[in-house]
């Protein structure tokens, strides 16, 4: 059995993130980054956190989730609302951002727990379809949610604005209009810190007793149960941690823009993040980070060919999967792995068929 | 005929009853479209064990082909009645070829690959079809022609266009009738095909155990291609029916019905043909009811919530077979 997620390249991963951060900071200081690139730094950070957190569910726990954007949505809306509500109380933007990210993580974790109760009873494709369903439900709810804050407290209503928010207060979430007038307090440094925290959390979880239990469940749930692993507990642990990190990523993402709407976090976003995870390699955090960064930049880099870029993106996606799974290429990878020199593709081993 | 009208009248004597019956008919009509799409999903899943996310986009391609074929056709008067049928046939042919082509190019090389790799490839194909449609046919919505109408002349000799038939207090549009009838016909044909014909039996054998089927002399690759061909052909029909009822055609038209039909297939028990039929119908009725009685905006949420509850009570769907895990 190969220990997927139990990567010896843990420190390489930290080094990559720190190195990339330092390099980009230097480039930014010497103003050698284009405006588009600068605008993409925070979204890249958010997508990297989304990818590593989904990798915890899909790669380490081995359950396919098609609703990860739902947790991002919870974090984005409730984290941003918190930041707006606290705008006067906490004047320092950095502290406010930190508080918002923590609140977002807590709400997303609660959502993850509530969703986990029914979801984790199911297996395989049925679990996948239920996560998809929850993603759509969360989208529908935030599309119709009104949330106002005034001196009397927080008011919430569904479908129409019945919050009766006082004139002095502020209607923060406005149904299908989402949240408008957000102060852009997300910074690249905050994104970097969030990535580092996510990596520390995930690597420490994966390399702990709990992490080994989670991977045992992935490899064979019945065997794991028979040696006394509490399947529900550890599945829930992985799912909730994954949701919490996705929530913070959502808040970070949302506060990089002036408006946020629920339709941004739809099925396509969930799929996009799943693409990062699968291309990066299941259980391979290093791969997820690289895939998330490259695939977020790729459509922008392809901009010169304008309307053909998404078509090319699709073709590249198909070709990458075809090449990575070509018998010849897989044989090559496996040979590298056997000599123990280079571990190129953690997702290409035999146990993977059990995942979906 | 008279007793049907009387029965309908008795049902519809109250205002609420009339509404209810209308909702049921609309629901069954929408559900029939979902069912046709779900049949494609479920057959492909049953045999190739893959979630073909590009299925929804094949619907969209079918609808576009149908649209252009219908507009390009200039048939002389007595043959004009056949134009919709010919357009749908053109769409079926194009989509069948498209489905087989996709399978050959994108999915076949991945037969031995992990299922997530196949899933991502299917997503890639879906992106490809959507963006190709965007380039070919632009993002501006096309208004789908009203196919299923009867053109006749009234008492004064003026030509009129009939869109619906009046049954007592309930008016049923021809689109609805055609949709429901085609769904039932397709369902019956598929049941006969998979149960009685040699190719259908080969299909079931492959979905049961590919290796054993091959040993019995069944050409597994040809059978999988055939499944994709049938699924995609059905998607073309579904596209034409969907756009006749909701005539707004854009490159993303297929994605939401695709997701809904996918949930319908799971709802009924994925891999099961009667399950897809039942799941599709129930999902359609549920959606229309949620729109009518709960909230238009929250209808999707209600549908998905019901799906979750059903899966919790019956984790393999309504008609799905429970597979016991061996230790």
Image (cartoon, rainbow, N blue to C red):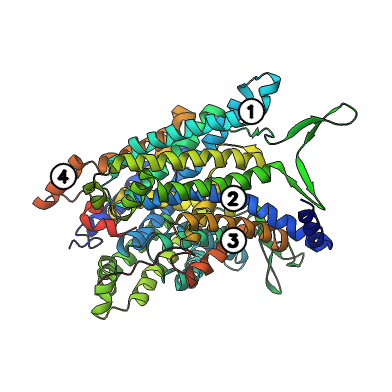
**Front position among marks 3 and 4:** 3
How far separated are the C-alphas under marks 1 and 2? 23 Å
Quadrant for the C terminus of chain B, please.
bottom left
The residue at which mark 3 appears reads as B303
Chain that bears disc 1: B
Residue assigned mark 4 = A331
Q: CA distance from mark 1 to mark 4?
A: 55 Å
Relative to B251, residue B208 above or below: below
**Residue under pointer 1:** B82
Q: Residue at x 42, y 44 (%)?
A: B123
Disc 4 crowd, CA 10 A, few/some/many (<14, 14-19, 20+): few
Question: Which numbered disc, 1 or 2, marks the residue closer to the eye?
Answer: 1
Are the residues tagged 1 and 4 within 8 Å (C-beta)?
Answer: no
Label 3 or label 1, whichever comes before in sequence order: 1
| Residue B305 rendering spot, x and y as whole percentages | 56, 65
* SS label for mark 2: helix
Outermost residue on the left side: it is A339
Front position among marks 3 and 1: 1
Quarter of the image for residue A15 reads bottom left
Q: Are marks 2 and 3 on the same chain?
A: yes
Q: In front: mark 2 or mark 4?
A: 2
């Amino acid at each position: 059995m190969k220990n997927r997620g139990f990567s010896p390249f843990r420190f390489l991963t930290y080094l990559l993130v720190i190195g990339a951060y330092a390099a980009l900071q230097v480039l930014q200081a010497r103003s050698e980054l284009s405006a588009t690139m600068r605008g993409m730094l925070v979204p890249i950070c958010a997508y990297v956190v989304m990818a590593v957190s989904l990798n915890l569910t899909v790669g380490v726990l081995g359950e396919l989730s098609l609703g990860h954007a739902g947790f991002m949505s919870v974090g984005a809306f409730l984290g941003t609302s918190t930041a707006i509500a606290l705008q006067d109380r906490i004047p320092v933007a950095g502290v406010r951002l930190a508080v918002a990210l923590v609140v977002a993580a807590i709400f997303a974790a609660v959502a993850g727990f509530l969703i986990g109760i029914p979801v984790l009873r199911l297996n395989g494709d049925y679990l996948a379809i239920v996560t998809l369903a929850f993603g759509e439900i969360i989208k529908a709810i935030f599309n119709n949610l009104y949330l106002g804050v005034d001196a009397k407290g927080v008011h919430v209503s569904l479908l129409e604005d019945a919050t009766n928010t006082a004139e002095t207060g502020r209607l923060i979430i406005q149904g299908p209009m989402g949240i408008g007038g957000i102060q852009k307090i997300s910074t690249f440094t905050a994104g970097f810190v969030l990535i580092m925290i996510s990596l520390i959390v995930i690597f420490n979880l994966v390399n702990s007793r709990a992490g080994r239990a989670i991977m045992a469940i992935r490899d064979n749930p019945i065997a794991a149960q028979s040696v006394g692993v509490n399947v529900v507990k550890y599945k829930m642990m992985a799912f909730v941690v994954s949701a919490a990190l996705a929530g913070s990523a959502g808040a970070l993402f949302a506060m990089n823009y002036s408006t946020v709407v629920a339709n941004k976090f739809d099925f396509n976003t969930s799929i996009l993040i799943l693409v990062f995870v699968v291309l990066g390699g299941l259980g391979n955090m290093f791969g997820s980070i690289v895939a998330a960064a490259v695939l977020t930049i790729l459509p922008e880099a392809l901009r010169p060919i304008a309307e053909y870029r998404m078509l090319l993106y699709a073709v590249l996606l198909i070709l990458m999967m075809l090449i990575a799974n070509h018998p010849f290429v897989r044989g090559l990878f496996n040979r590298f792995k056997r000599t123990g020199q280079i571990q190129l593709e953690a997702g290409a081993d035999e146990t993977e068929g059990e995942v979906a | 005929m008279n007793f049907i009208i009387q029965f309908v009248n008795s049902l519809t004597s109250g205002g609420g009853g009339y509404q209810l019956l209308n909702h049921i008919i609309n629901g069954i009509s929408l559900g029939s479209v979902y069912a046709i799409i779900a049949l494609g999903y479920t057959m492909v899943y049953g045999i190739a064990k893959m979630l073909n996310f590009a299925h929804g986009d094949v619907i969209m391609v079918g609808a576009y082909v149908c649209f252009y074929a219908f507009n390009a056709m200039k048939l002389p008067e007595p043959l004009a009645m056949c134009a919709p049928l010919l357009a749908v046939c053109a769409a079926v042919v194009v989509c069948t070829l498209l489905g087989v082509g996709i399978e050959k190019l994108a999915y076949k090389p991945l037969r031995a690959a992990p299922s997530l790799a196949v899933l991502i490839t299917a997503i890639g194909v879906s992106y490809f079809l959507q963006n190709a449609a965007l380039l070919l046919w632009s993002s501006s919505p096309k208004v789908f022609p009203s196919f299923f109408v009867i053109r006749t002349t009234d008492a004064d000799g003026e030509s009129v266009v009939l869109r619906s038939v009046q049954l007592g207090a309930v008016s049923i549009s021809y689109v609805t009738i055609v949709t429901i009838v085609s769904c039932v016909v397709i369902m019956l044909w598929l049941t006969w095909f998979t149960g009685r014909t040699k190719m259908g039996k080969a299909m079931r054998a492959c979905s049961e155990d590919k290796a054993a089927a091959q040993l019995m002399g069944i050409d597994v690759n040809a059978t999988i291609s055939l499944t994709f061909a049938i699924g995609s052909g059905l998607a073309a029909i579904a596209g034409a029916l969907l756009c006749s009822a909701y005539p707004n055609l854009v490159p993303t038209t297929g994605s939401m019905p695709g997701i809904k039909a996918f949930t319908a297939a799971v709802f009924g028990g994925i891999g099961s043909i009667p399950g897809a039929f039942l799941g599709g119908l129930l999902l359609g009725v549920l959606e229309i009811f949620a729109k009518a009685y709960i909230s238009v905006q929250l209808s999707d949420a209600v549908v998905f919530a019901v799906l979750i509850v059903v899966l919790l009570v019956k984790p393999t769907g309504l008609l799905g077979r429970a597979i016991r895990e061996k230790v």
